[in-house]
Amino acid sequence: MAQITHWADVTAGEALKLSNKHLVATGITPSGHIHIGNMREVVTADAAFRALLGKGADAELIYIADTFDPLRKVYPFLPESYAEHVGKPLSQVPCPCGECKNYADHFLKPFFGALEKLGIRPKVYLADELYKSGAYTQAIKTALAKRDEIANIIDEVTHKTTADDWSPFNPICTGCGKINTTKVTGFDADAETVDYTCSCGHSGTVPMSGGGKLTWRVDWPARWGILGVTVEPFGKDHASRGGSYDTGKRISREIYGYKTPYPIVYEWIMLGKKGAMSSSTGVVVSISDMLKVVPAEVLRYLIIRTKPEKHIQFDPALPLLNLVDEYEKLHYKTEITEYESTVIKLSHASGICHTDIPFKHMVTIYQAARGDIDRIMKIVARAGYNTDNEKCIRELAENVGNWLEMYAPPFAKFSVQEEVPVHAATLTGVQKAFLSAFSNIINESGELTGEDYHNLVYSAKEADSKLHSAIVQMPGVGAGELEIDPKDMFKAIYISILGQQSGPKAGWFLSSLEKDFLVRRFMDASTYKP
């Protein structure tokens, strides 16, 4: 059977045909909460970057925050008072919480913290600082001088006609501070200034360095040449026919004389049944919030395992457990293909915490321990897991606690009852006999593993087992042949501890509780009378 090559290696291979030196770029406008959907671009860029390094390329990863873009509207998460700031560059809009230097910084701070947890460490560029530094000045001069040529390219590609007063440069009005209400009336290439009028009634002159920015369809290709970008992922909206990548290719080549970067087009991440994530609509799960509930390597795996051109369905409730389970099974496979090895390597990164405790087991341990970290550590040790890295175990426990609080469906939650639940009154004679015999055998045994408990319960149906023999000899059960269904015995266990007929995986669950507690509880439940 032919080996499957991972998409990141395919990308790296194609890029290396063009050059051995690469700058992989990713960028997001911090207009709102930077969410899991945005994460696809960043992780895709990081995967391509690491694949290039793995093939011996001279590669660098950068992130550009579009902090000079205007605030488009008063988003659902903003107070109406922000209406006065609509149209201003994000770097010049006040911080929503009042604790960051500006609006953009408010959303970038948690995002950069999330990148660190994901093991992604790009060189960061802020667009407003790039413009103010003069990095774009020559590109602005060129764009203004070749305004008509750029307009023709846009018209030809989009099959639309640009307005007569259209300009590739948007000045920032020194009167109202807005960038989307101005019109260029002239420019001086030698003085490096631009004249404008604004709909607010103000007119004036601004410097090309920091006095405004190129419109997006021109800014993007200009950026490629300014920074030296050679590989870049971007969403399918930019890649649509007549979209900004189509115009960008021609503007880059024909206006700026720069070769178009190798493209990686990605699909959206869909949030459950709510559709594509979007900061502006509020359909989001922020990366920061998601890192509170799931290990970072699992979030990387969510992106790494799927080809960029395929959409990803994401649900932070019960399906998240299945995603974690899928990753853990792959991580601990003894024999893996080259493709699977690549997936694991790209999902994992230095600096990411890792334990050998399955997430699902920690869901059980956490609730059995009622969230108490000391009790959690004792259960983890008793279960035979490696306890050397307590920091990582604490992080996993915190992830699980947050998942239970924020996203877990009701049936995934349980609470160990302090006393024998009143539901124990519904136990049948056989179930009570089982609990009594089970209690005695546990008491006589050494420390039992989850598998030991699981097998012991199932042995109740075997006529020659110690547990079965003990059950049939219990008063009121009667000797002779007796059909014992393990399903009913598991129900008896859950009823006696949780007060409900079902619960977490029984073996893990029982091994998470103190043996002495189980001995007492099962014996008390076997004789319970309301």
Image (cartoon, helix red, strand yellow):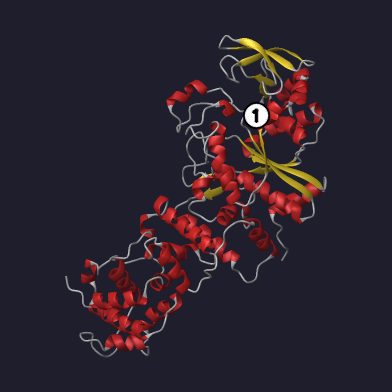
The answer to which image quadrant residue 354 occupies is bottom right
Residue 427 location (% of width, % of height): 24, 73
Task: Classify residue 502 as left or right of residue 85.
Answer: left
Of 88 and 338, the residue lying toward us:
88
Q: How many marks?
A: 1
Of 129 and 315, the residue lying toward us:
129
Q: Is residue 334 above or below residue 440?
A: above
The answer to which image quadrant residue 480 occupies is bottom left
Residue 72 location (% of width, % of height): 54, 26
Residue 400 location (% of width, % of height): 45, 57
Any part of residue 483 in sight: no
The answer to which image quadrant residue 29 occupies is top right
Any part of residue 498 in sight: yes
Task: Classify residue 9 as left or right of residue 201.
Answer: right
Residue placed under numbered mark 1 in the picture: 128
Residue placed at 43% from the left, 25% from the top? Answer: 80
Q: Name the quarter where the C terminus is drawn.
A: bottom left
Q: Is residue 193 above or below residue 460?
A: above
Secondary structure at badge 1 equals: helix
